[in-house]
């Protein structure tokens, strides 16, 4: 699938602007702080209902306005899809699919698929497990509504369970907890099973992408840390038992110490933990390989590639890796942003170049 047009109104530093994209390579070029990331952020928002920057929704409304309105039209094998979001500084955002308002973000998300990458995504490899869980959650939620709804239910039950754990009366906790635990472990089973399937499908492809990007020099392995395996029911049962075992500890801690909200992914490169021993460039390449592999999973599931957004990625790679990256993305619509455009890197490829200056399109190739 690909995005044909994007329209922005009072979104961050844009007043009114219309972008047209081609199915293939698109490059947003401009100096720092001109609106390149803002434009691709809008695209990601229109695909998922969330910001890749994980900010508050209201921040996207132009400083001088009270409403922002963004929409995109995408072409897919299943027909044209239009998504639209209206942000209100004083109210919740409203989302629309094909001009019909939808009340649940679960119905909005997953209509247009996208994979987003920018230097912040290095966190994926470097920083907290939360970033790696977020990666799985964003990806799986776009691919599977049942995952998204399980996750929403899980989070709700989890926060109720955690509130209960803070109650001073231990007898009440002892009586009530088993009820929460049945529900919690049921959703956990669904989440972990889908994550396990996701990681085992993703893993060989990530290795392949990593080998490709590095010219075959590095072999990457990845695996989930939590260790729950088997069917949904088997995992749910194991979690339920583990919750029982962790009971005293959870009361002491005042929160739930086991479950998919504590999971992590481990990456190793030539048998060394990437997080600990990897160079910046290696970590960046791993994160990028992960995102490229994610596009293949979308393809396997929907027989269509998602829109790949590569924000500020080129400048961080050496020339060899840049060229290999451009070759690797030629099957799908890709939107690059860069402050430095080097024609030589794009030699021989067809691209649509859009220059941005102070929240306005200044030129197209
Ligand atoms: N709500 C808002 N209203 C108006 N301007 C905003 C808003 N939010 C962010 N901006 C402005 O947008 C600009 C940053 O845009 P953006 O992040 O898209 O830059 P960029 O072109 O990607 O730059 P870089 O090359 O540094 O990544 C900043 O000048 C910032 O002040
Ligand atoms: Mg930027």
Image: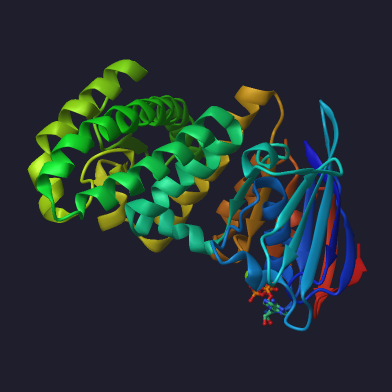
Residue at image x 67%, y 25%? 302
Image location (x, y in percent) of residue 287: 47, 50
Identity of the residue drawn at 26% across and 38% down: 225
- Residue 284 % position (x, y): 46, 56
Task: Pick the quarter of the image with the N terminus.
Answer: top right
Answer with left or right where residue 213 lies relative to residue 59. Answer: left
Query: Is residue 345 in view from this perspective?
Result: no
Quarter placement of the C terminus: bottom right
Q: Nearer the viewer, residue 174 or 33?
A: 174
Q: Nearer the viewer, residue 213 or 259?
A: 259
Q: Is residue 233 visible?
A: yes
Q: Which quadrant of the structure image shows residue 354?
A: bottom right
Left or right: 175 in relation to 113:
left
Total numbered badges shown on the rendered structure: 0
Name the residue nearer the viewer: 132 or 153. 153
Above or below, 81 relative to 241: below
């Amino acid at each position: 699938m690909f995005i044909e047009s994007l329209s922005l109104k009072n979104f961050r530093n844009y007043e009114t602007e219309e972008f047209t994209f081609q199915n293939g390579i698109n490059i947003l070029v401009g100096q720092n702080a001109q609106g390149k990331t803002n434009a691709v952020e809008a695209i990601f928002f229109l695909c998922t209902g969330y910001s890749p920057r994980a900010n508050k929704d209201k921040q996207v409304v132009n400083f001088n306005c009270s409403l922002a309105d963004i929409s995109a039209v995408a072409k897919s094998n299943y027909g044209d899809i239009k998504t639209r979001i209206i942000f209100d500084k004083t109210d919740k955002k409203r989302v629309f699919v094909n001009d019909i308002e939808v009340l649940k973000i679960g119905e909005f998300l997953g209509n247009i698929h996208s994979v987003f990458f920018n230097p912040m995504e290095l966190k994926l490899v470097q920083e907290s497990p939360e970033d790696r869980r977020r990666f799985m959650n964003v990806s799986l939620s776009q691919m599977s509504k049942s995952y998204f709804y399980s996750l929403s239910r899980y989070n709700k039950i989890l926060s109720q369970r955690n509130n209960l754990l803070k109650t001073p009366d231990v007898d009440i906790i002892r009586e009530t907890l088993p009820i929460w635990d049945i529900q919690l472990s049921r959703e956990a089973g669904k989440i972990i099973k889908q994550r396990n399937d996701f990681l085992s499908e993703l893993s060989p492809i990530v290795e392949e992408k990593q080998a490709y990007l590095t010219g075959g020099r590095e072999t990457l392995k990845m695996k989930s840390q939590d260790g729950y395996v088997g069917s949904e029911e088997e995992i749910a049962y194991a979690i339920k038992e583990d919750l029982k075992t962790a009971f005293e500890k959870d009361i002491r801690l005042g929160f739930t110490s086991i479950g998919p909200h504590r999971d992590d992914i481990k990456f190793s490169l030539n048998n060394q933990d990437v997080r600990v021993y990897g160079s910046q460039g290696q970590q960046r390449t791993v994160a990028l390989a992960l995102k490229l592999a994610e596009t293949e999973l979308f393809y396997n599931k929907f027989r269509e590639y998602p829109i790949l957004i590569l924000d500020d990625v080129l400048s961080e790679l050496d020339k060899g890796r840049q060229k290999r990256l451009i070759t690797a993305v030629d099957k799908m619509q890709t939107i690059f942003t860069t402050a430095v455009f080097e024609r030589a890197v794009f030699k021989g490829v067809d691209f649509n170049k859009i220059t941005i200056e102070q929240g306005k399109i200044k030129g197209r190739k």
